[in-house]
Image (cartoon, rainbow, N blue to C red):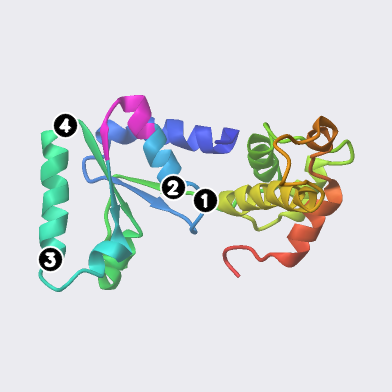
Amino acid sequence: MGRAATQITSTVYKYWNQATLGTLMIGPPGTGKNLMARAVSNKTGAFFFLINGPKIMSKMAGENESNLGKAFEEAEINIPAIIFIDKIDSIAPKNKRRLKANLNVDIGIPDATGCLEILGIHTKKMKLADDVDLDRIAADTHGYVGSDAASLCSEASMQQIREKMKLINLDKDTINTDMLDSLGVWITTLQDILNLTRRSDQ
């Protein structure tokens, strides 16, 4: 979680006890709302219960209220508890404007600095080639949300493995150490993936 996300999480945590009507996190998919709610849960030691709005609404008619009721009953047993309803607008789409909360947190798309922090987190344990400039990649990921940046790093890592698999003799029990040492993510790999993939909002 980047510095900006940590600051938002701290704000949510600070006012959480005052938010008797709840906290409404507003932002596009992939910006880390779920992660922030879990972070607050970990920091407060509260029981965390996740409700998937679209999934619960896909149940047969008559089961929706029952499923929601069970969730709140379980949370009451495990007080203190946090009930996180993902995509709450899918439960009451007609009342979207009437959703009320004591604290509204607007979680927008990260800027270049935010993207750089996210890329730094997801590449921390990756072997990057000397030509990789994360500042440059962050500038090229304008409009990317956290999950987009995470997918970029994951795909770049997998791409390197796929390329090396062609050179590995699977009939042998061991792999040459030089082969393993040569594994790494190059700037061209990241750029190729950027050119071939779309942001989650496209």
Q: Which residues are magenta?
A: 40-48
Q: Which residue occupies the foreground of this view, 129 or 164?
A: 164
Amino acid at pointer 1: Thr
Farthest residue to the right: give it.
131
Q: Which numbered tag is attached to residue 87?
A: none
What residue do we see at 24% from left, 67% from top?
57
What residue do we see at 72% from left, 47% from top?
170
Q: Nearer the viewer, mark 3 or mark 2?
A: 3
Residue 14, quarter of the rendered image: top left
Q: Which residue is mark 1?
A: 31
Q: Nearer the viewer, mark 3 or mark 1?
A: 3
Q: CA distance from mark 2 to mark 4?
A: 22 Å
Q: CA distance from mark 2 to mark 1?
A: 6 Å
Mark with earlier residue (3, 4) = 3
Q: Which residue is mark 4?
A: 79
Q: Which residue occupies the foreground of this view, 173 or 104?
A: 173
Mark with earlier residue (3, 1) = 1
